[in-house]
């Protein structure tokens, strides 16, 4: 069996006047993530993990922030394209593991919704998606509540 592993990472600054969307889920908070698209760090990290496992260009190359076509785009569009590339190469998503780093808001109450959203986007069972929420213990931009980051790992297999 051919197995591929991908790792992705993303970070966006928190600002006023933007919606906070993580894993395709709207999270009620006074701040949102700054970016050219919806700035969903979870789905951006996931895209890079999927693309990286396939040896494909990263999200910034496929959907550059210089291109007005992607202004305010929903990141689920990026995931759909990355997933289409995975499937076209004859692979399937076996599992995904996500680590979201945020001081605020507390993400525990939203973890199951994020897991369900990501599972639906990928067409896998929720049990194949891990979601962990961590703080940075007051260290760096995330720890100061200025940003949110996410690490994503994926395992792809051929059926």
Image (cartoon, rainbow, N blue to C red):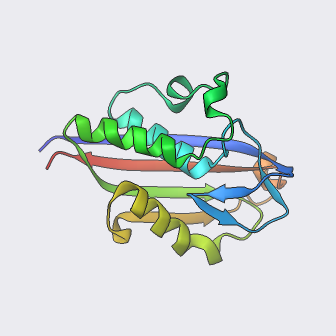
Residue drawn at x 40%, y 63% as measured from the top left: 119
* Residue 93, position as x, y percentages in the image: 30, 51
Q: Is residue 4 above or below residue 114?
A: above
Q: Which residue is at the far bottom?
A: 109
- Of residues 68 and 139, the one nearer the viewer is 68
* Residue 15, position as x, y percentages in the image: 85, 49
Residue 100: quadrant of the picture: bottom right
Residue drawn at x 22%, y 34% as measured from the top left: 89
Say if residue 140 shows up in the picture: no
Q: Which residue is at the far right?
A: 16
Q: Is residue 9 above or below residue 159?
A: above
* Residue 116, position as x, y percentages in the image: 46, 69
Give the total number of marks visible in the rendering: 0
Horizontally, is 104 left or right of 77 in the view? right
Q: Is residue 159 above or below residue 55?
A: below
Residue drawn at x 42%, y 56% as measured from the top left: 121
The quadrant of the rendering that contains the N terminus is: top left
* Residue 90, position as x, y percentages in the image: 19, 39
Residue drawn at x 60%, y 25% as measured from the top left: 64
């Amino acid at each position: 069996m051919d197995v591929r592993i991908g790792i992705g990472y993303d970070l966006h600054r928190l600002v006023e006047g933007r919606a906070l969307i993580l894993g395709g889920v709207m999270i009620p908070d006074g701040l949102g993530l700054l970016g050219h698209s919806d700035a969903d760090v979870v789905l951006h990290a996931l895209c890079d993990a999927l693309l990286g496992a396939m040896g494909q260009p990263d999200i910034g190359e496929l959907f550059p922030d210089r291109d007005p076509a992607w202004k305010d785009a929903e990141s689920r569009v990026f995931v759909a394209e990355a997933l289409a590339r995975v499937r076209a190469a004859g692979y399937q998503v076996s599992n995904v593991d996500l680590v979201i780093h945020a001081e605020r808001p507390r993400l525990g109450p939203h973890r199951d919704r994020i897991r369900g959203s990501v599972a639906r986007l990928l067409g896998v069972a929720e049990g194949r998606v891990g979601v962990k929420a961590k703080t940075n213990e007051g260290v760096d931009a995330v720890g100061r509540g200025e940003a949110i980051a996410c690490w994503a790992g994926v395992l792809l297999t051929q059926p």
